């Protein structure tokens, strides 16, 4: 009998290639630790939509609900399948389907990874971005309207140029008090456990987005008061973008809404050597969590065997950590560190000439349990 049943959704493009390596590493590490894992594969995603006109079957959430965790590669075939279908139904659909509100994206560079900051060393940087993953601007609320549509009557009155436009598009960000509070609390809880720095930095843009982010800022202060043992501060997202580059060592736990968290975590991926090195997971407190690297399906390099599987491998390690299997998680991370820092096998994005498979094999061969 398996200790953990994992639902695997490789998705599209390089998602399929990197998940294969993640599973290879995971299987080997778990076997050595005497932990039984079972994997059921689900072929959902943009490719599935091309064949069957369904990206995610209607009963998918019920099906996935029976698993201990979900391991996802990447979804999307831009140009062939509308993003609202592939990415929208599968990635955003599963995140909201299981209320996976805390998208956790660690920023911990491995020495030997591509390095873009001349003024800092990899060991100076160790923080994590917590991105709210179920609300904000990703709720798909709004629409496109003719300027004389009754829905936009009040909006048209704001500026005369709006009324002269052929079309008005409205995208509404939805921020609930409870949704903001729980993700901010999650950030403080993590800061308590993390590494002794115990510091949470919130980011908004409340000088311009006054309603939603004004509320977020207020809630942040209220929650901070519940954690007097933790330091807290905040900055607008434009300033934070700059600080990620100029002073990345000042961060411990960063908490952001869905949109800014999305943007900031591609920026923070650059601090760990690129999207090929950045792991992540969407945590739920009521259903299975989904572990997926922040990178996309990269159709431009799919099938070439050059995608960097490190992000997916570290994502598998994160999944084991969250399942409570710290030994397996640490063993995978240690093997990745050895492979990357000694340049044993690196894909071209990291300056090497190894294939996706060779990196997976090298990490597997290096696991010591
Ligand atoms: C990410 C991705 C997704 C997101 C897209 C594919 C919807 O950019 O995981 O960061 O924005 O959440
Ligand atoms: Mg993103």
Image (cartoon, grey):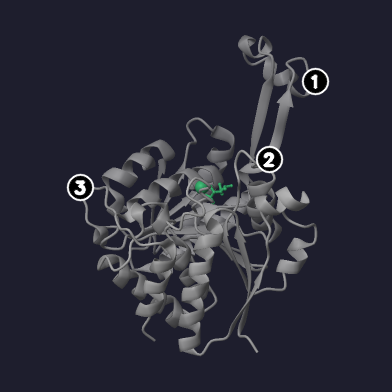
Give the secondary structure at mark 2.
strand
| CA–CA distance in space, label 2 to label 1 | 20 Å
Disc nearest the viewer among 3 and 2: 3
Q: Is residue 335 above or below residue 290?
A: below
Q: Is residue 50 left or right of residue 14?
A: right
What secondary structure is marked by label 3? loop
Q: Is residue 105 left or right of residue 97?
A: left
Query: Which tag, 3 or 2, sits closer to the chain's start?
Result: 3
Q: Which mark is residue 271?
A: none
Q: Residues within 10 Å of mark 3 (few under 14, many from 20)?
A: few
The residue beneath circle 3 is 118
**Total of numbered circles in the picture?**
3
Is residue 124 in view? yes
Give the CA distance from mark 3 to mark 2.
40 Å
Residue 150 — which label?
1
Residue tagged by mark 2?
A: 140
Seen from the viewer's position, the closer of residues 278 and 230 is: 278
């Amino acid at each position: 009998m398996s200790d953990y049943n994992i639902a695997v959704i490789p998705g599209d493009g390089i998602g399929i290639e990197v998940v294969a390596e993640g599973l290879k590493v995971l299987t080997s590490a778990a076997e050595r630790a005497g932990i039984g894992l079972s994997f059921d594969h689900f072929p959902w995603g943009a490719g599935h939509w091309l064949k069957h006109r369904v990206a995610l079957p209607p009963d998918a959430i019920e099906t996935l609900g029976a698993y201990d965790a979900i391991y996802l590669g990447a979804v999307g075939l831009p140009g062939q399948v509308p993003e609202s279908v592939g990415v929208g139904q599968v990635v955003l659909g599963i995140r909201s389907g299981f209320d996976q509100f805390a998208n956790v994206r660690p920023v911990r560079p491995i020495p030997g990874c591509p390095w873009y900051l001349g003024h800092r060393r990899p060991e100076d940087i160790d923080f994590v971005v917590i991105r709210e993953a179920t609300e904000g601007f990703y709720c798909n609320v709004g629409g496109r309207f003719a300027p004389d549509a009754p829905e936009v009557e009040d909006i048209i009155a704001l500026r005369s140029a709006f009324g002269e436009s052929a079309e008005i598009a409205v995208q509404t960000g939805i921020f609930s008090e409870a949704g903001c509070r729980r993700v901010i609390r999650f950030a403080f809880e993590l800061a308590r456990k993390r590494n002794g720095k115990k510091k949470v930095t919130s980011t908004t843009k409340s000088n311009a987005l006054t309603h939603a982010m004004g509320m977020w800022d207020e809630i942040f202060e209220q929650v901070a008061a519940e954690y007097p043992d933790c330091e807290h501060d905040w900055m607008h997202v434009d300033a934070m973008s700059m600080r990620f580059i100029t002073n990345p060592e000042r961060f411990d736990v960063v908490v952001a809404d869905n949109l800014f968290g999305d943007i900031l975590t591609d920026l923070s991926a650059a601090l760990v050597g690129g999207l090929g090195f950045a792991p992540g997971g969407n945590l739920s407190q009521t259903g299975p969590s989904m572990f997926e690297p922040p990178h996309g399906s990269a159709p431009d390099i799919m099938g070439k065997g050059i995608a960097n599987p490190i992000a997916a491998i570290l994502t598998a390690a994160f999944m084991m950590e969250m399942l409570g299997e710290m030994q397996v998680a640490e063993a995978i991370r240690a093997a990745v560190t050895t492979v990357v820092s000694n340049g044993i096998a690196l894909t071209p994005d990291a300056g090497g000439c190894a294939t996706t498979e060779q990196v997976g094999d090298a990490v597997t061969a290096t696991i010591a349990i």
